Image: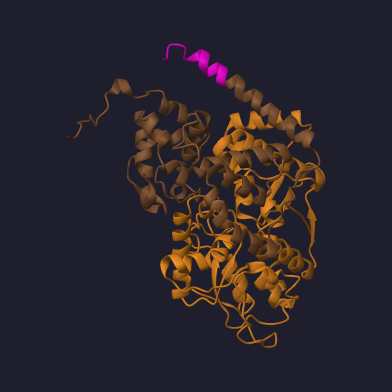
Chain colours: A orange, B brown
């Protein structure tokens, strides 16, 4: 199996461990990830705030390249794997707006033409969680497991833009794909109603007191629910929840010390991959030893 | 002695075309259907920090309180989590309305003050991607602090060092190879934007 893959800017910088662990996990599952050639930034929320037509055109360049690189005869669809929540939303939104709004369609088509590109609408934006659950399937993932995450209590954090406003592969109010995946590998997802509540995005850098408050609410509740670790699927959520913990503790007189890992890092541990290949050395709050390293086969439930 | 201010605006002081202008942006066309139920404000994780709640922003936009809306803190606090958009019983894409208002505020250069960091971040991001096709997080953050608040830059530098020591920060800027293609793409949108702006200007010649 092979997928086209769009890393996005954050996975080359603060979210490096997400790319490392994602590559390692898919490699272990025998799936090849082929990077999108000369991809550009999706535009994130900042571009939409300045000029949305340019934001759509920027995102469409990636779609056009994906269609070209994915190849195949005209009716064939091309799956593009997009692990970052913000990139996932912007690319999905662009596709939808091209179809819904003639003005967007005309502007984007003209811009692509000026850049010697074209887009036919044959790309499907896929989140790695979607691919793992629906294409690779949990049974296959479990078959590859070398050790159980037995008893590790995980708060699965989906963040906002992966399932809002477009719930393409999971429930908008109570997404379960990450919970199911980690449960299948032996972890114990805790009941945590804030799993889709916003982390504030770049507010931790711009209006810090507001950004810290939002993350404090998430961390405090995760701790209260008995989580040992928070699992994320977005580089900005991971950064906010992990890197500001000491500041949050000081500001709100709190004692939170929760490791925040990408779900792919936890998966990698279950697949028996080395800590280095999963980028665990990049964590600010280190993950302690797993509760019980039992032999595979002890855990059931898909 | 306290001065007496008139708190209610006369209709003549409102901008009657503002609602139509915002409603013409993609995703904002349903703004006139708002029933003022307040679901958006209730679901917004940031409304407790806002000067006007999202419900009020929608009402004020429709009524033509252009200056008040463009100057408010609310539009910049919106972190685009889309909670309001999915909850709205009239399917108004409120996140898109906030984007349209941000765009208008940036275009008209209406900021709360020049060093207010959120529009600074948006503009710096915009410029860097237009130039290189990619966003270099570390450089972006450094530029934002230098242009908004140097004191914050010093405060945040410890975090920067910690990231650096874990290989999560780099100063080299990322760039795509085919920058020429990107320039052609963005220039095309610029031209269309300009043509559209001219059209609306001539189309509403009567307006002052």
| Position of residue B159 measured from the top left corner of the image (x, y, whole percent) | 60, 61
Which is nearer the eye, A44 or A89? A44
Query: Which residue occupies 44% across, 35% down?
Result: B30
Query: Which residue occupies 62% across, 45% down?
Result: B143
Count of labels shown?
Answer: 0
| Outermost left residue | B1
Image: A25 above or below A211: below
| Position of residue A6 measured from the top left corner of the image (x, y, whole percent) | 72, 52
| Position of residue A18 measured from the top left corner of the image (x, y, whole percent) | 68, 63
Reply yes or no: does residue A160 show up in magenta.
Answer: no
Res A20 visible: yes
Which is nearer the eye, B131 or B164? B164
Image: A124 above or below B204: below
Q: Which residues are magenta?
A: B197-208
The C terminus of chain A: image quadrant: bottom right
Image: B76 above or below A175: above
Image: B97 above or below A174: above
**In the picture provided, is B97 more to the left or to the right than A259?**
left
**In the picture provided, is A76 more to the left or to the right than B68?**
right
Place residue A61 in its image quadrant: top right
The N terminus of chain A: image quadrant: bottom right
| Outermost top residue | B206
Place residue A66 in its image quadrant: top right
Res A302 visible: no
């Amino acid at each position: 199996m092979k997928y086209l893959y769009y890393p996005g800017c954050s996975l080359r910088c603060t979210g490096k461990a997400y790319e490392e662990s994602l590559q390692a996990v898919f490699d272990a599952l025998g799936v090849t990830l082929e990077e999108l050639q000369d991809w550009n930034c999706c535009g994130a929320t900042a571009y939409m705030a300045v000029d949305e037509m340019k934001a759509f055109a920027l995102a469409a360049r990636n779609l056009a390249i994906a269609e070209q690189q994915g190849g195949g005869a005209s009716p064939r669809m091309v799956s593009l794997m997009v692990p970052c929540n913000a990139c996932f939303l912007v690319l999905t939104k662009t596709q939808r707006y091209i179809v819904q709004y003639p003005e967007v369609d005309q502007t984007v088509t003209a811009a692509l033409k000026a850049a010697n590109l074209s887009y036919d609408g044959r790309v499907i934006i896929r989140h790695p969680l979607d691919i793992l659950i629906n294409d690779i399937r949990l049974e296959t993932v479990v078959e590859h497991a070398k050790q159980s995450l037995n008893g590790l209590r995980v708060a699965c954090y989906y963040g906002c833009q992966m399932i809002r406003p477009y719930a393409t592969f999971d429930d908008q109010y109570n997404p379960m794909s990450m919970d199911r995946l980690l449960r299948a590998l032996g972890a114990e997802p805790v009941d945590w109603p804030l799993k889709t509540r916003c982390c504030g995005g770049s507010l931790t850098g711009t209006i810090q007191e507001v950004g810290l408050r939002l993350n404090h609410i998430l961390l405090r509740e995760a701790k209260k629910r008995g989580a040992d670790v928070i699992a994320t699927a977005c580089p900005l959520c991971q950064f906010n929840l992990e890197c500001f913990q000491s500041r949050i503790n000081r500001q709100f007189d709190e004692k939170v010390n929760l490791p925040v890992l990408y779900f792919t890092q936890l998966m990698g541990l279950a697949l028996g991959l080395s800590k280095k290949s999963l980028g665990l050395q990049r964590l600010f709050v280190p993950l302690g030893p797993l509760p019980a390293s039992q032999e595979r086969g002890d855990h059931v439930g898909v | 002695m306290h001065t007496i201010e008139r708190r209610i605006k006369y209709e003549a002081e409102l901008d009657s075309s503002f609602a139509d202008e915002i409603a013409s942006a993609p995703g904002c066309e349903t703004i006139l259907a708002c029933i003022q139920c307040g679901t958006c404000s209730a679901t917004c994780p940031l409304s407790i920090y806002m000067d006007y709640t999202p419900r009020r922003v929608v009402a004020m936009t429709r009524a033509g309180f252009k200056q008040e809306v463009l100057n408010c803190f609310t539009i910049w606090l919106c972190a685009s989590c889309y909670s309001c958009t999915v909850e709205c019983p009239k399917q108004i894409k409120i996140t898109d309305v906030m984007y349209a208002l941000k765009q208008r505020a940036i275009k008209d250069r209406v900021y709360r003050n020049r060093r207010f960091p959120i529009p600074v971040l948006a503009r710096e991001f915009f410029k860097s991607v237009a130039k290189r096709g990619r966003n270099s997080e570390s450089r972006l953050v450094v530029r934002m602090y230098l242009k908004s608040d140097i004191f914050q830059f010093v405060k945040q530098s410890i975090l920067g060092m910690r990231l650096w020591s874990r290989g999560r920060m780099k100063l080299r800027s990322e760039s795509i190879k085919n920058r020429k293609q990107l320039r052609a793409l963005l220039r095309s949108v610029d031209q269309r934007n300009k043509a559209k702006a001219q059209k609306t200007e001539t189309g509403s010649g009567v307006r002052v």
